[in-house]
Image: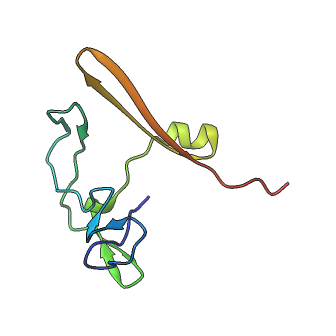
Amino acid sequence: MMHGPCGEANIYSPCMHEKKCTKHFTKKFNTETTIDEDGFPIYKRRDDGRQIKKGKTNLDNRFVVPYNRDLLVKFQAHINVECATCLGQSNIYSNTFTKASTM
């Protein structure tokens, strides 16, 4: 799943607030996955030159939204799950997006 386009490519995107993406896109290219000082993952993002075209904008790996394929298939929904460890406590944050039932 790709995020955007937003930022200079689309300042009227719903994720934009005060000329910044509220989801912190575009992400930086990284050679490995690390954990930041707050316990959140900074995912590996390869700079392999591949791009897709969305509208008039080319998007690369900096716009990829991480997801869990197994949860996507099982629940037929996009579930974005991140686990953060802070002060010895584990917290799980999740957002679930599903299509409305057409019954």
- Residue farthest toward the front in the current orientation of the protein: 18
Choose between 75 and 91: the one closer to the eye: 91
- Quarter of the picture containing the N terminus is bottom left
Q: Residue at x 54, y 37 (%)?
A: 71
Which residue in the rendered view is the most extreme toward the bottom? 56
Residue reaching furthest to the top: 88
Q: Quadrant of the C terminus?
A: bottom right
Q: Quadrant of residue 76?
A: top right
Describe residue 62's horizontal placement relative to residue 15 as left or right. Answer: left
Q: Position of residue 77 (x, y in %)?
A: 59, 47
**Residue beneath the point at 20% across and 39% down:** 33
**In this rendering, would 47 be left or right of 63?**
left
Q: Is residue 97 above or below residue 13?
A: above
> Residue 75: x percent and y percent?
63, 39
Which residue is depicted at the point 43% across and 69% down? 14
Which residue does the image show at 21% across and 68% down from the upper left?
Answer: 49
Q: Quadrant of residue 81?
A: top left
The image position of residue 9, as x and y in percent, is 29, 79
Q: Quadrant of residue 62?
A: bottom left
User: Is residue 31 toward the left or the right of residue 55 in the image?
Assistant: left
Percent coordinates x, y for residue 6 in the rendering: 33, 72
All told, the count of numbered labels is: 0
Q: How is the image coloured?
A: rainbow
* Of 18 and 81, the residue lying toward us: 18
